[in-house]
Image: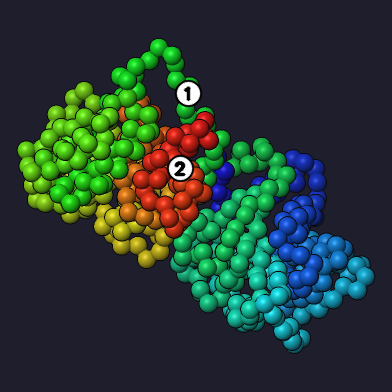
Amino acid sequence: MIKIFATEKVKEIDKSTVEYQHIEPIDLVEEAVTAFVNEFRSQYTKARPVIVFAGQGNNGADALGIARRLLEESYKVKVYLFNPTDYLSPECVENKRQLLSVENAEFTEIRGGSKFTPPILTPRDVVIDGLFGSGLNRPLEGGFAGLVKFINASPAEVVAVDIPSGLFGEDNRENDPTCIIRANRTYTFNFPKLSFLMPENEKYVGEWKILPLNMHPQAIADTPADYFIVTEEDIAGVFAPRKRFTHKGTYGHALLVAGSQGKMGAAQLAAKACLRSGVGLLTVHTPKCGEAILQIALPEAMVDIDAHDAFFTQAPEVSGYAALGIGPGLGQQIETAVALDELLASVANPVVLDADALNLIAANPDLLDKVPERSILTPHPKEFDRLAGVSLSAYERLQRARQYAKEHRVCVVLKDAYTAVCTMEGNVYINIGGNPGMATAGSGDVLTGVILGLLAQGYDPETAAVAGVFLHATAGDIAAKHWSERGMISGDIIDCLGNAFKQVI
């Protein structure tokens, strides 16, 4: 897992690294400079003029060091250091000295009272933003706010050092959106900022990449975190090899309650994804209108027929099943709400709740009291807002999801471009895989099927949720390579689940 630390924790890790490794803070700056320049060279040729805007702190120190290294490598660089209070951090002082030792360095320092004449920026220019780092805790104002607006209004391409200036590392609800750099790329060091993962901040961060530095592993291990990015290595350790002498009963019998007239596609997608996830047996409880559809489309699945022709009205017997999933294409009729109430009252083990099951709970809050502890809820943002109240930002919604998971002792899979799995312990596991091609009808039904299949195989709910999200995203990335983001459909994700397992395990 890659930990996502609050900004103040990163400072503690930097300090601990200096102590553990018996180095100077300037050495950390130089390592960051090297990592940034190596990445910059791979993206920008020496034909592109570079304009560096540096601030007074260590983000400015990074920017000055980057300017020096680019000059040494024959890039054409102009540097502007903004020092309105006539104070520079020690690392900034040292990197200013080193920069000025480079022959023909074009350097301008703007001190308090001095006038800044902005350069003319063209589409060929690359601006390196090193004005403010992640330690910023209030919106920019005055001259710095004006400088940010000038850069944003220019046609130049902008690359941010560690974090776009003006953006806070976590909560930006009280920030001024007009005073945040809009970067095309952000090269951050060691750990992403939580704010990078919020959709409302995409326009500031642009494409982002983590550049690893040699931080002391003990310092990282000793620093607690609530947020984590899930890696392929994490998921590879989840799946043990299958033993020779096993049978279909070894891998669980799942029950999926899904489908209604006109929405049998959702049931079919969830069922097929469940089967592709490795479950031993699957029974789908569905209205009479879905029997022929499922029997023909999915001969591997068994079908349990509801008493009603068009929608779910009858809670099936749940004994004998390893796991239960409810919701895809279910419908929201009154009779369905009553049947859902009866069904939840009959189960004790964690269940997977999606789509209309969540909408029915939102409309009938008393149902939530009957949801077994550690159950997995898989809402998209609007579904979660119906459950927990409207949020004005993705950050606010994520905080509500964390609280909701803890308060109701469930696992919330908050689906989005970066899907977050919130556990009842307060941890959040974020998946950064997947692609925009997965924003297609039925993709969520596929995820429900995958998670249900893993839960039925005996994986604990949190593992089933985290691993299911990762496999779903991996299959989506494989599908996009084959069919393209525009051309792929949710069924393609199912078809790529086998290759996703092969890639991960």
Do we see residue 95 in this rendering? no
Q: Residue lying at the far top in this picture: please name it.
A: 245
At x 47%, y 33%, the residue is 501
Please tell me the numbered disc located at residue 475. 2
Label 1: state its secondary structure: loop
Asked if 88 appears above or below 207 in the picture, the reply is below
Badge 2 density bin: few <14, some 14–19, many ≥20, Cα 10 Å: many
Mark 1 highlights which residue? 240
At x 26%, y 35%, the residue is 298
Q: Amino acid at mark 1?
A: Ala
Label 2: state its secondary structure: helix
Do we see residue 5 in this rendering? yes
Separation (CA) of disc 2 from disc 1: 19 Å
Badge 1 density bin: few <14, some 14–19, many ≥20, Cα 10 Å: few
Asked if 39 appears above or below 309 in the picture, the reply is below
Q: Position of residue 84 (x, y in %)?
A: 72, 78
